[in-house]
Amino acid sequence: MNDALRFLLTESPDPLPLDSVDTWWRRHLELLTRFPAPADLALTGGFRADRLGFAFASGYHAAHRFLFPMLPADRPCALCATEPAGAHPSAIQTRLTDTGSGPRLTGEKAFVTLGTRAELLLVVATEGQDAQGRNRLRMVVVDAKRPGVRVTALPELPFVPEVPHAELVLEDVAVAPDEVLPGDGYARYLKPFRTVEDCHVHLALLGWLFQVARRSGWPEPVREELLALAVMMRGLAQADPEDAATHLALGGALDLAKRALERCEPLWAQVDAPTRERWERDRKLLGVAGKVRAKRLETARQRMAGGTEGGE
């Protein structure tokens, strides 16, 4: 942690321009060799970003490093869950079937973040239903260049347009047995991902805000509060993402971060115009999945009130 904090305090707060997602990835890889811990990678990647979109990309990739440490660190990956009917486990129709000559994947994903830049696709697929009629999900790693894989870029979003998104079509894609990750695809990977992503993306946000604060001469108490929030969020990023207690603490941490942002509002007048204008455009990102977070927090409260110590 201290190495990451010293980085934030001593590195130049003037970021090099990032003109594309490819440039972002090269800079992100440079940090990976120095900060292998996903939480530190998210924090320092955010600090190095010249805008919120690329800070988000660093946090998003760091979340994958935490949840999928078995994957090669030098290859960008993307989680592929959302389908035309949504991302709920019951909505997953992409199928993993054993044809006798090995597993095959067939299906569609409607919205894949960083999909056009990913080299490895983490595909949530169903093997069928269990006795209660629930989808039995698995997580499958697929090379984005494999025959039968088609990735199509989606139009830019009105905020963080630098972060690409894509549609994915899988047509009878051959899968090696060791590319089907061990464990339940929902309980082990998809369910905890939102918590892991929230922690790492907010670490990247705090790293980026601290850079803006240093560069723009924000008061020292404000900068110190941002550092304190980063230390708190780093601790949560290393906690069990399936434990209800983690969700309670994360709910409080996200609320504290929101209040800090509100107190910083008048200070944006000191920030250079391009950075300030991009922030006004991109801050909508922070409200994405707010309903999911609220539901997660309420579920955690109910579980803890009932004496259940496990996750949601």
Image: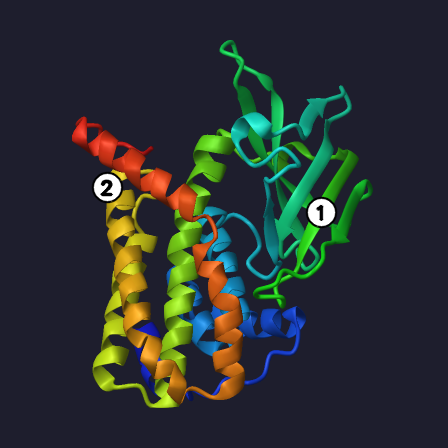
Q: Nearer the viewer, residue 129 or 259?
A: 259
Mark 2 or mark 1: which comes first in sequence? 1
What's the residue type where badge 2 is placed?
Answer: Ala
**Considering the image in quadrants, where does the N terminus appear?**
bottom left
Instruction: From the viewer's perspective, tell me whether residue 11 is left or right of residue 140.
Output: left
- Residue 115 vs 99, above or below: the answer is below
- Residue 51 vs 61, above or below: the answer is below
Pointer 2 residue? 245
Q: What residue is drawn where x is 59% and y is 40%?
A: 81
Q: What residue is drawn where x is 52% and y is 47%?
A: 70
* Residue 41 picture quarter: bottom left
**For the residue carrying disc 1, how many other residues have a C-alpha within 10 Å: few (<14), some (14-19), or many (20+)?**
many
Q: Nearer the viewer, residue 268 or 95?
A: 268
Tell which residue pokes out farthest to the top in this image: 131
Give the label, 2 or 1, closer to the camera. 1
* Residue 302 picture quarter: top left
Q: What residue is drawn where x is 30% and y is 60%?
A: 233
How far separated are the C-alphas under marks 2 and 1? 35 Å
Is residue 46 in view from this perspective? Answer: yes
Q: Nearer the viewer, residue 292 or 240?
A: 292
What's the residue type where badge 1 is placed?
Answer: Glu
Residue 217 image point, x, y percent = 33, 90
Is label 1 in a helix, a strand or a loop? strand
Residue 112 image point, x, y percent = 63, 49
Tell which residue pokes out farthest to the right in this image: 147
Instruction: From the viewer's perspective, tell me whether residue 113 is left or right of residue 201.
Output: right
Q: Nearer the viewer, residue 181 or 194?
A: 194
Pointer 1 residue? 167
